[in-house]
Image (cartoon, helix red, strand yellow):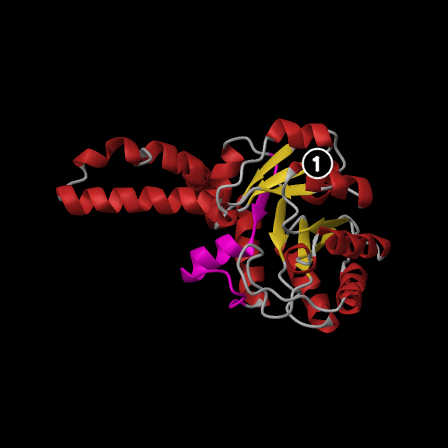
């Protein structure tokens, strides 16, 4: 089964699937190795990793396509990604869909913010007229060549015009043919239940460090009928904290001796990145090449 079919199966399922966020190919490989069924690659983590900046829409479509291609190439599980505003008008959206599809993503979401898009949990957001967003949704659907590519539409209207306005937009997105519509910021269990009642299609909840100290009970989300929950920045924050602690210890102690358990053992790292398979592949090609030369010399 392809990664895209697997993702559609996840989103149509009856159990809650946890989807941690990767900030690069290596973190995605760790997520897969720990047994998760899918991975999220969002703009917040991508901008933090690539530029060491907050997500204020300062990257472009090609940067994201290259970044997502590396993440997708590192894992076999589905990768669900952030497409910001589609990076422009309907023709930009068309290019984005083709580029992200070629990168190997299983699904993506487009936001109705004005350009430049910023993290949904940052202040200063503005949204485009709903007609502009509907045109982008239609363009995205028409541009995909693989019908299994999962295309979601997200609105940031909840923090600007209220949850009811966000739900009304989501209903229009679904009428336009989106595979999922999500009102960003509708995060409480009561708001999520309202969305599930009013908006057809699956729902993916978001638990992000960028949202601050918000607690969501996963059992309650599953009981409500949520298909998946994403943790888009968990790996980014975990890695940043771990590196900071390690560098502080190295600076303080002028030695690696105290870092012991903080560092992944070399054999574990090589197993994670597939060193043995790479070496075996090299040796196999070398043997095949040597055999070909020997055969020609014997003729």
Q: What element carries label 1?
A: loop
Q: In this view, does 192 lie to the left or right of 213?
A: right
Q: Mark 1 points at which residue?
A: 227
**Residue at left offset 79%, top offset 59%:** 141
Residue segment shown in magenta: 37-59
Query: In x, y percent, where is residue 49?
Result: 44, 55
Q: Residues within 10 Å of mark 1 (few under 14, many from 20)?
A: many
Tell me, yes or no, whether the highlighted magenta stretch contains residue 44. yes
**Residue at left offset 81%, top offset 44%:** 198
On the image, which quarter does residue 123 sit in?
bottom right
Query: In x, y percent, where is residue 93?
Result: 70, 67
- Residue situated in front as seen by the camera: 242 or 172: 172
Query: In x, y percent, where is residue 19?
Result: 59, 39
**Residue at left offset 72%, top offset 31%:** 224
Q: In which quadrant will I find the N terminus?
A: top right
Q: Is residue 169 above or below residue 26?
A: below
The answer to whether residue 6 is visible is: no
- Residue situated in front as seen by the camera: 112 or 76: 112
Counting labels gives 1
Q: Is residue 241 left or right of residue 109?
A: left
Q: In this view, does 56 lie to the left or right of 160?
A: left
The answer to whether residue 238 is visible is: yes
Question: What residue occupies the far left of the structure in this picture?
Answer: 254
Question: What residue occupies the far right of the structure in this picture?
Answer: 175
**Residue at left offset 71%, top offset 51%:** 163
Query: In x, y percent, where is residue 16?
Result: 66, 31
Tell me, yes or no, whether the highlighted magenta stretch contains residue 128. no
- Residue situated in front as seen by the camera: 5 or 238: 238
């Amino acid at each position: 089964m392809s990664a895209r079919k697997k993702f559609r199966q996840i989103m149509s399922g009856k159990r809650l699937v946890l989807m941690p966020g990767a900030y690069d190919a290596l973190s995605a490989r760790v997520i897969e190795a720990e047994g998760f069924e899918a991975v999220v690659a969002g703009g917040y983590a991508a901008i933090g990793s690539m530029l060491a900046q907050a997500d204020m829409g300062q990257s472009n479509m090609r940067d994201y396509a290259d970044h997502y291609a590396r993440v997708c190439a590192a894992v076999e599980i589905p990768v669900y990604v952030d497409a910001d505003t589609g990076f422009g008008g309907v023709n930009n959206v068309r290019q984005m869909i083709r580029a992200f599809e070629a990168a190997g993503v299983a699904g993506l979401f487009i936001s109705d913010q004005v350009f430049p898009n910023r993290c949904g949990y940052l202040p200063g957001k503005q949204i485009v007229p709903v007609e502009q967003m509907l045109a982008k949704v239609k363009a995205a659907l028409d541009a995909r060549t693989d019908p299994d590519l999962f295309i979601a539409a997200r609105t940031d209207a909840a923090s600007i015009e209220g949850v009811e306005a966000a739900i009304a937009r989501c209903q229009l997105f679904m009428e336009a043919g989106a595979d999922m519509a999500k009102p960003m910021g509708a995060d409480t269990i009561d708001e999520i239940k309202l969305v599930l009642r009013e908006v057809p299609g699956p729902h993916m909840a978001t638990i992000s460090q960028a949202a601050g100290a918000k607690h969501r009970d996963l059992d309650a989300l599953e009981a409500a009928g949520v298909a998946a929950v994403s943790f888009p920045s968990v790996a980014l924050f975990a890695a940043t904290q771990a590196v900071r602690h390690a560098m502080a210890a190295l600076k303080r102690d002028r030695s690696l001796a105290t870092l012991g358990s903080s560092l992944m053992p070399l054999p574990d790292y090589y197993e994670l990145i597939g060193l043995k398979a790479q070496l075996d592949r090299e040796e196999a090609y070398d043997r095949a090449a040597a055999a070909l030369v020997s055969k020609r010399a014997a003729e």
